[in-house]
Amino acid sequence: MGSKGSKPQRQNQYARRLERKIKKFEKLGKNTDGLKKELGYMAGDERPQFRTGREADPKFKQRARD
């Protein structure tokens, strides 16, 4: 089984592929807003926080108690 490379190498490769895809989409006249946003996240922008797990599960939502 081949080596996956180091984490920084994989992240750099992902960012370069995103840049290439953005260039390609712009040439084709396609919308690149989402790709640019993802590239921003790769550059260090904060990702939005989503409720996950138990706090997002409707079975466990807080009920008003009398």
Image (cartoon, rainbow, N blue to C red):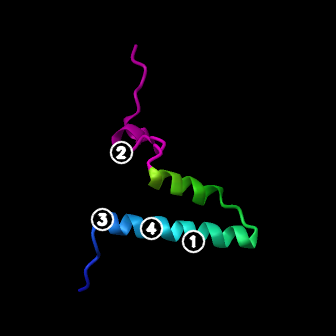
Residue at the spot x=41%, y=25% of the render?
63
Amino acid marked by disc 4: Tyr
How far across and down, in percent of the image, does residue 28 sit? 74, 73
Closer to the chain start, of discs 4 and 2, is 4
The residue to which callout 3 is attached is 7
Amino acid marked by disc 1: Arg
Q: State the mark number for residue 14.
A: 4
How far across and down, in percent of the image, does residue 44 sit? 44, 48
Circle 3 packing at 10 Å, graded few (<14), some (14-19), many (20+), is few
Q: CA distance from mark 3 to mark 2?
A: 26 Å
Q: Nearer the viewer, residue 52 or 35?
A: 35
Q: Looking at the image, which residue sits at the far right?
A: 29
The residue to which callout 2 is attached is 53
Q: CA distance from mark 3 to mark 4?
A: 11 Å
**Viewer-side label of 4, 2:** 4
Amino acid marked by disc 3: Lys
Q: Which region of the structure is painted magenta?
A: 44-66
